[in-house]
Image: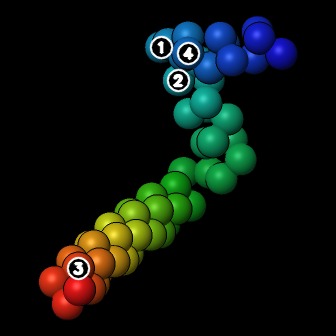
Amino acid sequence: MLFNFTFLGMIGGPQVILIIAVVLLLFGGRKIPELMKGLGSGIKEFKNATKEGEQSAKEEDKKD
């Protein structure tokens, strides 16, 4: 169990290359841009939602 946690902290160049190779094999070269676009839009929506949440919290604090 302890080995699993220490392994996650030691990701280097060869591991990144292996991960990229596996992703290419699974999804192919044509699907990756679509996946990245979807991931980017998801992150953008998440950031907008957190900003709206912070603004609404500030407005509620001002009311109190």
Q: CA distance from mark 1 to mark 3?
A: 47 Å
Confirm whether residue 48 shows in the render. no
Of label 2 and label 3, which has the lower sequence position? 2
**For the residues bearing labels 1 and 2, Cβ distance under 8 angstroms:** yes
Q: Can you identify the residue that label 2 sits on?
A: 16
What residue sits 66% from the left and 13% below the top?
7
In this picture, residue 18 sits left or right of residue 59: right
Confirm whether residue 5 shows in the render. yes
What residue sits 54% from the left and 51% below the top?
29
x, y percent for residue 41: 39, 71
* Disc number lying in front (2 or 3): 3
Q: Nearer the viewer, residue 33 or 55?
A: 55
**Residue that protrudes farthest toward the front in the picture:** 64
Q: Can you identify the residue that label 4 sits on?
A: 9
Q: Nearer the viewer, residue 4 or 50?
A: 50
x, y percent for residue 46: 40, 70
Of label 3 and label 4, which has the lower sequence position? 4
**For the residues bearing labels 2 and 3, Cβ distance under 8 angstroms:** no
What residue sits 61% from the left and 42% below the top?
24
Q: Quadrant of the C terminus?
A: bottom left
x, y percent for residue 23: 63, 42
Q: CA distance from mark 2 to mark 4?
A: 13 Å
Of label 1 and label 3, which has the lower sequence position? 1
